[in-house]
Image: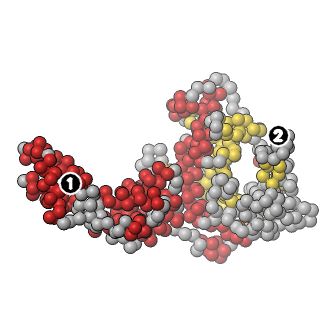
Amino acid sequence: MSSALDTSVAAHATYEPVIGLEVHVQLLTATKIFCSCSTRFGAAPNTNVCPVCLGMPGALPVLNRKAVEFATLAAMALNCRVNEASIFARKNYFYPDLPKGYQISQYDKPLAEHGFIEVPSATGKNKKKIGITRVHLEEDAGKSLHEGFPDSEQKTAIDLNRTGVPLIEIVSEPDIASPDEAYEYLTRLKEIILYTGVSDCNMEEGSLRADANVSVRPRGQHKLGTKTEIKNVNSFRFIRDALVYEIARQIDLLESGGTVSQETRLYNSHEGKTYAMRSKEQAHDYRYFPEPDLLPLVVDEKWKAEIARMMPELPEARRARMVQNYGITEYDAQVLTVSKSLADQFEAAATVASNPKRVANLVQSELMGRVKARGTEIEQSPISMKGVAASADLVESGAISGKMLKDLYDLCFERGKDFPEVYEEEGRPQQSSDTSALEKIIDQVVAANPRQVEQYRAGKKTILGFFVGQVMRAAKGQANPQSVNELLAKKLG
């Protein structure tokens, strides 16, 4: 196979990928969707189970009202039309971790349909709408464990704790045109779901899982190519990488005269390749039929209105308001709204800071680099947003210089403490505006650099920055830069 890079170039020239995503999101309810068993992660295997989720004869499901409310809220946040009536169905298939032999899901009459998410376009100038076909409720299956047990090479262990955990499946239209666009879609989707509070979207614990359907076709052709499904990918970055590889693989097949088989494939992140798992099932293979033990789900207008009142301000609207209210850039707003918690902290700090824009700038210029160097997220920074606001006010008032702020931030990260605490520990340092002390330092610097003095007086005014740097260094960063500039200009004539 030619390299993925070479083939991706060919894809842009002669082929176009068509991508759709199916995302399963675990709802943040305390109990399962059809019984009162706990949804707590990490319990001992097969302890969060009962006759209902184990599919024992005669056990009947009872729908969890909170799961319906969370699913409806998520659907509204994704701009979907919530159907007044939806039907639960049995999806029939046989697998060791599905004790009933079927999964209760929704099929032809889902909870919600016809939504969309906006993502940045390829040009970056406009936004592109990615359609959402449907959002429906369903129960999770159990988990097959293939490692870490005696005789695991010959045997598979089954943990049924996840069986019956409430999920929503969010199915996109095949509107996604590249692996990067898929990454953006997933990022925005996760962001929206987190803001609603209906899920923690923890991929490591299985709270968010995404499968990708991908095909390629000659550019300009309307007929879709044969698709493959990539399953069990545990990060957005790996989904993007898997799509890059799979697109290249399909193009190579077609270019060599072969055909693409409709199948399910797994991605090996260590090798950067996808491998065939099984032939892809069609909907009729599951023999869907209405669930006889559950009545139609009715979400009437009154209930919809109650759920709509639970809707928080969503990320895009919040960014627009923050740009308007605080005079920050769209990029600043994007960084500061990466999570609802961070956005809440920033707004709490910005309302008390003398200059909210400076707070945003310090997050960008001083906080982010230190956080990335540690390999952590901004939420794990020892300096809180209130700490950033306190430091911003000190710089704004001229109490400390930029150099002093950098040194104090370094100490915060070394000690794992917030800015106000470190500032107190260091004796509340202040930059000096004592002109007599500064004049002595300036005299020493000027006397030590006669050649630069001659250059300045000969008209090379840009060399003033050299003198400012020398004075600030001699003053250990505690001199007021404005005073230094004024005194130097006067001294040098």
| Above or below, comparing residue 262 to residue 419 in the picture | above
Q: Quadrant of residue 303?
A: bottom right
Q: How crowded is mark 2: few (under 14 residues within 10 Å), some or many (20 or more)?
A: few
Label 2 secondary element: loop
Q: Where is residue 265 in the image (x, y as percent from the top left)?
A: 71, 39
Which quarter of the figure is the N terminus placed in?
Answer: top right
Residue furthest right in the image: 57
381 lies left or right of 396:
right
Q: Where is residue 90 in the image (x, y as percent from the top left)?
A: 82, 56
Q: Which residue is drawn at 70% across and 67% down?
A: 29
Say which residue label 1 marks. Answer: 471
Q: Residue at x 67, y 38 (%)?
A: 268
Mark sitting on residue 275: none
Say which residue label 2 marks. Answer: 153
| Above or below, comparing residue 468 to residue 13 in the picture | below
Q: Residue at x 47, y 68 (%)?
A: 345
| Front tag of 1 and 2 | 1
308 lies left or right of 148:
left
Q: Which numbered disc flags the more N-terminal residue, 1 or 2?
A: 2
Cα–Cα gap, marks 1 and 2? 70 Å
Residue 190 visible within the image: yes
278 lies left or right of 181:
right
| Above or below, comparing residue 383 to residue 288 in the picture | below
Which of the two residues, 373 or 92, is positioned nearer the viewer here? Answer: 373
Label 1 secondary element: helix
Q: Where is residue 210 in the image (x, y as percent from the top left)?
A: 65, 50
Residue furthest top in the image: 256
Which of the two residues, 208 or 44, is positioned nearer the viewer here? Answer: 44
81 lies left or right of 94:
left
